[in-house]
Structures are given as structure tokens and as C-alpha cells.
Image (tube, rainbow, N blue to C red):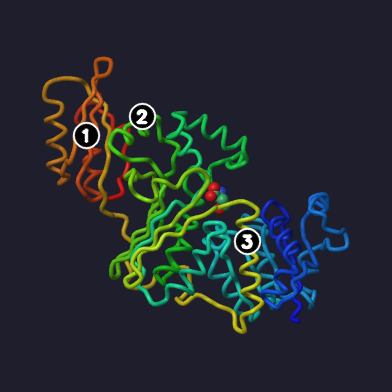
Amino acid sequence: MKKINVAIMGIGTVGGGTYEILTKNRDFLRKTQGVDFEVTKVLDKNLERIRSFGIPDGKAASSVDEIAADKDISIVVETMGGVEPAKTFIEKVLRAGKSVVTANKELVSKHWPDLEAAAKKGGAGLYFEASCVGGVPIIRALQEGLQANKVDSLVGIINGTTNYILSKMTDEGVSYADALKEAQQLGYAEFNPTADVEGFDAAYKLSILSSLAFHTCIPYTCVYREGITNITKADIKAGRELGYVIKLLAIGKRSGDRVEVRVHPTFVPVGHPLAGVSGSFNAVFVHGDFVDDLMFYGRGAGARPTGSAIVSDVVYAAKRSEPLYSDFVNDGKVAPGINVSTDFESKYYLSVSVKDAPGVLAALAGVFARCGVSIETVLQRGQDGGASISFLTHPSSESDVKKAVAEIEDLDDANKVVSLIRVLS
Ligand code: HSE
């Protein structure tokens, strides 16, 4: 039977989950995959952490060089996270000819070309199923299940932390700050939650997924990004009254040579399948020209689901005769001729706080008309001498809506656009 020795660099939650699967399911993998996987080395600066997973001291590696020099190791799992030293370590073992399996979306989205170049140099593979949507095999589906199709859109909830917070706000009427605090207490949100709540994590993942779906590099810097920190109880309530729930959506679309990639809070119609994706779950809708609609759903984080994705890559790497590389020029640049546009079209919800006086609504309507934004619904409520007017627009361009927002705020010092939320149609 083929024997594959595996090293793990970084034995935190996900690295520990990976070790557990490879150890507990070793016999199962022998029987079903015909390969005997053994974790022979673990690298972590904290020996106590290594011991906490029941890993014998003899497996603790002293440095990445020890792993790179070990001729018997052919696959290295990286679960350290962050850019450095993960990048240096991965490149070192790739150049030594060892295939790498990583869960590191920040690193892949920022340095994929360098990593792939190192992999090619070493004749090794670079696999990252676990970098996006946890245990849901979305990358394998894009690379190996949907090649027949021109994928024209992927729309999803790909960050569990923000989905947990928004679900909590929706279901229990709590504020953003209270929902965040609870997410931190439960271990869903980090002590410093910026990467999740400001949409960076989703933008990294969308950059990877849309590059694979649209067959061109889509650098994460091209992704339009807004987080959830400004979402209020009033927004949740307004959404409910209009038949929507708020989700942080990642949206990638390709039409001919035009691509749009964006992450932002979105009103999702209550009847849409994404509206029912709650808590820390993730889901991605993919549309291909022949396959039509697909939905992928499951746990987007956690030791066991993410470990499951990592082990699937370990098995994949062990059984492939040739490494799998990108099917596009992976140079970190959008392919010539492809235009990543930030002037996308959407329906919008705007909530404007104004003075309650004759002519105010007419003036706002005039701004929308001048900016070419057509209104579908208007709601007005009085509040302490002022008023709150909410508008739902017909599909409009981002640039026209932004122009209208600036003009509304210029009309009168008392005017303030307090919410601007895109609507999924
Ligand atoms: N922080 C991520 C999330 C999990 O909340 O979805 C790992 O990608």
C-alpha cells in the first residue's frame, strides 16, 4: 500500500482538527483510498499545544528546514494563518518538492502567483480547498465539476462570523455591539474582529473563488468591500417591513469581458434560499450557462469541517499523478481585455433623515430624477420634529445612486443619508 508521510505546520484549531481526522480515520482512508497517511512531523512554536492534541514529542519538528529536508515527507499542511512566516515556510517546502495543502485565504489571495511559481519550481502541488467556505467543496466543484460551463455568477454568504452576528440581530433584535460581543464569547469572532466584520475575509475568499470561476486573476484589491459595522437595529427592522433580511453577500458576476466583484451588506428577499442560511453557516449560489443554478451549503469554519476540506486535499494530492495548477495566467493581474467594473447595477434601499417641512419629499424626488434613479417605493415616518424617509429604487447604477446621495446631503444641512443598502433582486 502507498504510504504518505504528512507534516502539519501550525497546530491550532484547524491544524488540530486535521491531525484528528488523519489519525482517527487512518484505517478508513487506508481501506477507501488505498493510501496509508501518517502525520510524522508537526511544527509549532508552542510544544504544549502540540502535546494538547496527544501528539508525541518525537513528532515535534524544530524548524521548517527539518520538514523541507525530510525526504520521507511528501505533503505539508499549513494551518498557521496570516501572511508571514507562512509564505516563507510554504515556499521553502514547495521548492523542496513537497505538495502543500493550506487553509490560508489571506495568503492565497495576496500571493497566489508566488506560491504557484514555487510549486511549479518544485514540481509540487498547491491545494487550498479549505481556504474558502470551510468544509463545503466549492473549489473542487469549480475546478473539477463545472469545467463544461461558463460560470456567470456566484453569490454567497462566505463569512460565518458576520452571518452569525446578522442572524442574531435579526432573530433577537439585539444591537450590532451586543451580537458581536456574544460572537466573541462563543469563539465565532476574534478578539480583533476587523478581518471578518469589515469584509476582508469575504473579499479574500471572493477573490479566490471568482478567479477560479471566471478563469482570470481577480486580485482581492479589485473587490469592492463594505463590512457590517454600520448595520443598525433600524435597518434590520426596515428590511423586515419590506420583506428582506440583511446578509453580508459576496457577489461575483461575469458578462462577456465585464466582471464585477463585491462584498457588502445586502437586503435578501425572505423567500430567497440565501435568506434561510442562518448562524455560522455558509452558502454559495453558482450559475453556469449549461448546468443552470447550483447551491452549496454547509459549515464555513471550525476544526472538523475545515479539517475535512484539508484532508480531502491531502488525499487528492496523494492520488494525482501530476499537480493541478491554475487554468489561467496566474500573474496577479486581471487578464488583458477583462474589465473589472465597480459601477454595478442593483436595487437600493436608502434611508434619509430630513427636516419635516413642505417640499422636502419633492426636493428629494427631484434629485433622484436628475440622477436617473427611478423610485419603486417610498415610506415616510415622523420623528422628533424631523422625518425619516426610506426609498427603494428600481435597478440603478452605483454611480448614479452615489451622485444622488451626495446631492441629497448638499441640499440641506439637516439631510443625512443614514443607510444605503443594496438589494438582491
Ligand atoms: N473567519 C471565517 C468566518 C472562518 O467567519 O467565516 C474561516 O474562514
Q: Residues within 10 Å of mark 3 (few under 14, many from 20)?
A: many
Q: Nearer the viewer, residue 45 or 312?
A: 312
Q: Residue furthest bottom?
A: 321
Asked if marks 2 and 3 touch (Cβ < 8 Å), the reply is no
Query: Residue at label 2?
Result: 234
Q: Secondary structure at mark 2?
A: helix
Residue type at the position of mark 3: Ser
Q: Earlier in the sequence, mark 2 or mark 1?
A: 2
Query: Residue at label 3?
Result: 308
In this rendering, the answer to whether 406 lies above or below 112 is above
Q: Earlier in the sequence, mark 2 or mark 3?
A: 2
From the top left corner, tell me how far across and down residue 200 is, in percent: 49, 50
Q: Which mark is residue 408?
A: 1
Q: Residue furthest top?
A: 384
Q: CA distance from mark 2 to mark 3?
A: 39 Å
Q: Secondary structure at mark 1?
A: helix
Residue type at the position of mark 2: Ala
Which of the two marks, 1 or 3, is nearer to us in this view?
A: 3
Residue type at the position of mark 1: Ile
Left or right: residue 5 compared with residue 132: right
In this rendering, the answer to whether 191 lies above or below 153 is above
Rendering quarter of residue 377: top left
Q: CA distance from mark 2 to mark 1?
A: 20 Å
